[in-house]
Image (spheres, grey):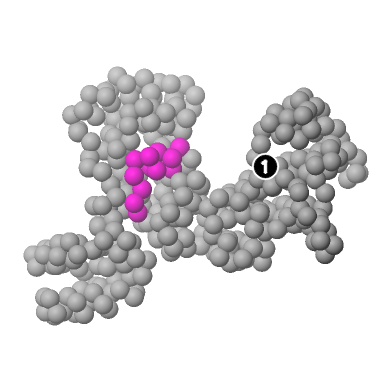
Amino acid sequence: MSVDFCGPFCARRRYICRKMSLFSARQIILQADVFSPYLQKGWKSLFGKVDHINLKKYTLYLGSVYIQKKCCHNEANPGESAKKWTPAFAGSVLEKMRAEDKTFYSVSVKDVIQKLQCLSNAQLPADEIEELIRESPYFLQGKNIEPVINVLQEHGFEGRSIFDIFMSYSRITDEDPSNLFDSLMFMRKLYKTDRRFNNALTACPEMLTLTKTEINGRIRALQDLFKSDDVLDLTVRSPHIFFEDFETVQEKFDYVFHTMGISQRQMMYSDMFNYPLLHMQTRHTFLERAGFYKKIKKDKGEINTNPLLQDILRLSDKVFAKKFGNMTELDYKTFAQYFVIELDSMNE
């Protein structure tokens, strides 16, 4: 059954939107099956019989329309954008792109102007758009840039967030808008809160290329290593954990947990899964041999004076060497080179 958005039904939509908060709109999207019967009951009392309405479909529509209205800015002034994105500018962009990649011959000057205009209308400043062209130009080849932007806006992504997504995953403009919407709905339900949802997607929009089965499988595997409540926060801090071979993830966990003797709680805030295993091994061994780290025997009441894992991993080579042993960056890099040779000889 189709939904009639004309006449009295538009009045219903306006009435409900006036009563709805942004939080409520997102909750309605997340729990359409739950909210639909309640909306049906309320509409019947206000407007009479509504049995002909596809309530779940309309509930999703209502929530997304309200989010777009509240979260997105108005379109940029068309005249102002037209002055910026001239045929001469678009032509110079294409000339440079075609010199580097012949596939850009399939893109016309008109296409470039239209796509740049779409980004302007999404409230991306001109300097950010030009940065996109320089650093991640493949969005210009996408066939669905306008509907993709619309879908992102429906889920609350604004100018800067859209810029971050395009910078990390410019091929998103080739995504089917319907599939993209479904993927975003799944991710929103998975992360439960707007903060986690937005942070995860802007940090690693490539997550949208994963299937629901792949995501759920990795979540279940991580729940064997960390508390269930911590796993989602962990994937927000280290979203690329979805893409790494799980054997490598397990090796990192085992080294930090068993060899270094560090708890899961400290792991959560160290971003350890963003670093190679070799980096962890080199830093830890350096500290051990310099006398700044030892494995704590809690059953004997030893006090933990070891540096925090985040300090071990995050500091630059220069700061790390200076802080632990008052050494130079060259001293540390020399140690790291010899340590690799040592590991290779041990593995032979």
Measured along the vertical axis of the image, is residue 131 above or below residue 268? Answer: above
- Tell whether position 85 is magenta: no
**Nearer-the-camera pick, 174 or 284:** 284
Q: Is residue 186 visible?
A: no
Residue 274 location, quadrant: top right
Residue 299 placed where, x, y %?
A: 82, 64
Question: Which residue is depicted at the point 80% across and 45% down?
Answer: 293
Q: Which residue is drawn at 57% across and 61% down?
A: 230
* Quarter location, residue 171: top left
Image spot of residue 182 (x, y percent)? 40, 60
Question: Main structural element of the magenta stretch: helix, strand or loop?
Answer: helix
Expressed as whole percent of the image width and height from the top left, the position of residue 99 reads: 47, 21
From the viewer's perspective, tell me whether residue 44 is left or right of residue 38: left
Q: Please give the range of residues in magenta.
A: 155-167
- Judged from this view, the residue extending furthest toward the left is 7
> For the residue labelled by badge 1, is the local secondary structure a helix, a strand or a loop?
helix
Residue at image mark 1: 311
Q: Can residue 321 be seen in this view?
A: yes
215 w.r.t. 33: above or below: above
**Residue at (73, 30) in percent of width and height:** 322
Foreground pick, 340 / 282: 282
* Residue at the spot 34% in from the left edge and 65% down from the top edge: 27
| Relative height, residue 200 to residue 118 (above, below) | below
How many labels were placed on the picture? 1
Q: Give the position of the C terminus as an image quadrant.
A: top right
Residue 81 or 316: which is nearer the viewer? 316
Q: Name which residue type carries label 1.
A: Asp
